[in-house]
Amino acid sequence: MYPNMSYCMCQNTLLALHQVINAMKNEGPMFLHDLSRSEREAFNEIFNACQTFINLADELVEGEEEAETRSSK
């Protein structure tokens, strides 16, 4: 289920996401128009996953900052 090894999953995922972002920039509105049905579904899932990622990342950063504040007292 997981396509990347844990030691490089962020790096590999970042490269793949940049590939999608560059295609979106280069193709503009035609990017969505040219996607197959399954690719459009995957695009929508990426969109939702990015929103979840941002929310979870914010929580993790806040938790880390709180832990650092407590440990420095």
Image (spheres, grey):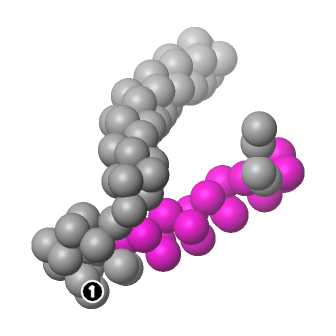
Segment tinted magenta in the rendering: 5-21
- Asked whether 11 falls inside the magenta stretch, the response is yes
Residue found at x 61% / y 58%: 13
* Residue carrying label 1: 26
Where is residue 56 drawn, in percent x and y?
46, 27
Q: Left or right: 52 with respect to 10?
A: left
Residue found at x 66% / y 54%: 10
- List the single residue furthest toward the bottom: 26
Foreground pick, 30 / 14: 30
- Asked whether 16 falls inside the magenta stretch, the response is yes
Foreground pick, 16 / 55: 16
- List the single residue furthest toward the front: 37
Where is residue 30 drawn, in percent x and y?
19, 76
Where is residue 46 drawn, in percent x and y?
42, 46
Question: Is 4 rendered above or below residue 23?
Answer: above
Where is residue 17 drawn, in percent x and y?
49, 64
Crowdedness of circle 1 by 10 Å Cα count: few (<14), some, many (20+)?
few
Q: Give the quadrant of residue 68.
A: top right
Question: Is 69 rendered above or below residue 42?
Answer: above
Q: Give the quadrant of residue 12.
A: bottom right
Residue found at x 52% / y 26%: 60
Q: Main secondary structure of the magenta part?
A: helix
Question: Is 19 rendered above or below residue 2?
Answer: below
Observer able to see residue 23: yes
Q: Quadrant of the C terminus?
A: top right
Question: Is 23 rendered above or below residue 68?
Answer: below
Q: Quadrant of the N terminus?
A: top right
Residue found at x 82% / y 46%: 6
Amino acid type for the residue under numbered disc 1 = Asn
Foreground pick, 41 / 3: 41
